[in-house]
Image (cartoon, grey):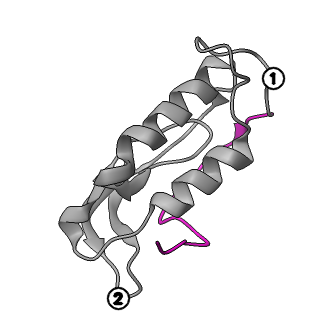
Amino acid sequence: MRVSALLSILVLGACTGATSTKSTHSGDPAPTTEEVEALIASANHCEVATDCVDLGTTCPFGCWTLVNAAEADEVEAAIDAFAGGGNTNCTFTCANRGEISCSASGVCEAASTSTN
């Protein structure tokens, strides 16, 4: 599995997101920002563009959360657990996402087309 150091994300605006120890529905502590970011980065890999899906704009992880479709449910569950811990105080201005592609280095990417 390839790990991307940087996600193809354009974030314009301010974002705050401290880590949390609040419990989720399962009784486990909410994951930290760093844990979710690491999971997103490790799930952002592909061989072809159709391997990639966009989980959308998620506070504080930015615009276009691009991950491998096979790992999307796991990443989405981690994001939901994070949000359930009260860590979602962000303001984003996101560019419109263009077509998703798989880079030569095997990372899901998308170009911006214009700003909302």
x then y, percent, for residue 18: 80, 33
Query: Which residue appears at 40% of the width and 56% of the height?
Result: 66
x then y, percent, for residue 38: 63, 56
x then y, percent, for residue 107: 41, 74
Is residue 55 shown to the viewer in this render?
no
Q: Residues within 10 Å of mark 2 (few under 14, many from 20)?
A: few
- Measured Cα–Cα span from mark 1 to mark 2: 39 Å
x then y, percent, for residue 31: 69, 34
User: Under tag 2, what secondary structure?
Assistant: loop
Is 17 within the magenta?
yes
Quarter of the view holding residue 32? top right
Query: Which residue appears at 33% of the width and 71% of the height?
Result: 46
Q: Residue under circle 1?
A: 21
Query: Which residue appears at 27% of the width and 77% of the height?
Result: 47
Q: Nearer the viewer, residue 30 or 5?
A: 30
Is residue 67 shown to the viewer in this render?
yes
Q: Nearer the viewer, residue 90 or 88?
A: 88
Quarter of the view holding residue 36? top right
What label sits on residue 104 in the rendered view? Answer: 2
Q: Nearer the viewer, residue 5 or 16?
A: 5
Q: Residues within 10 Å of mark 1 (few under 14, many from 20)?
A: few
Query: What segment carries the magenta color?
Result: 1-18
Specify the quadrant that holds the C terminus: top left
Q: Main secondary structure of the magenta part?
A: loop
The residue under label 1 is which amino acid type?
Thr
